Image (cartoon, rainbow, N blue to C red):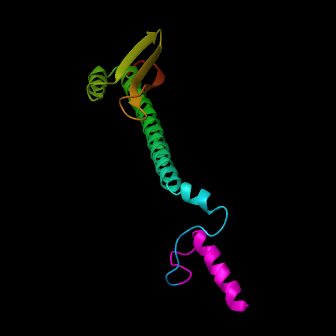
Amino acid sequence: MFKTCAAILRAGAYWLGGSRQSPTVGASRTPKVAGDHVRQAQRGWVSLETAFGAIAIVVVVLAAGGLLHAGATQVACHDRAAAIVRQLARDDQAMADQLIDDLPTDWQIQSRRDGQQLSVTVGTRVAILGPWLPQLSVEASASAVVEEGL
């Protein structure tokens, strides 16, 4: 009786996918229980689900990397705007021009002066998931008061 129960348990584990070896030597792989024909019809779905899961993981990782890139670009825009407005507030036009020339070619800069207040905005566009999808506009502004007497 014990040998019969063990053989049944081995056969159940085999058909449920737990063991790759046949429960008995020379046993056929035909379904022995009522639900086996359903499991055999779904054999390729595991590969398909794994493929879709892998694609989803790749898209999420790319999106996270793109968002990190956008954040780093935001910080760089703010640093450049602050440096440029600082030089303009000190009336150091040569250094401000050098900082503007050092900007990447696809970055835009706008400056405005309202009385004693200077404002500089630096911006660009960042591709989150590649150049074929819509891009995110990133910009940062910095302001300073004009320094007199330097």
Q: Residue 116: x percent and y percent? A: 47, 13
Examine the structure image and report whether residue 2 is included in the region drawn in magenta: yes
Verify whether residue 32 appears in magenta.
Answer: no
> Farthest right residue?
1
- Seen in the picture, residue 28 relative to 38 is either above or below; the reply is below
Instruction: Give the extent of the magenta segment.
Output: 1-24
Quadrant that contains the C terminus = top left
Residue 8 location, x and y as percent? Answer: 67, 80
Quick one: 56 or 10, which is closer to the camera? 10
**Residue 109 appears anywhere in the view:** yes
Drawn side of residue 13 relative to residue 105, left or right: right
Question: In the picture, residue 7 is in which quadrant?
Answer: bottom right
Whether 119 is drawn above or below 30: the answer is: above
Tell me which residue sits at (55%, 59%) in the image: 40
Q: Residue at x 57, y 69 (%)?
A: 17
User: Which residue in the rendered view is the most extreme toward the top?
Assistant: 115
x 50%, y 43%: residue: 60
Give the quadrant of residue 120: top left
Q: Give the image location of residue 103, x and y in percent.
A: 30, 28
x then y, percent, for residue 108: 35, 20
Q: Quadrant of the N terminus?
A: bottom right
Up-down relation of residue 35 to residue 80 (above or below): below
Number of numbered discs on residues: 0
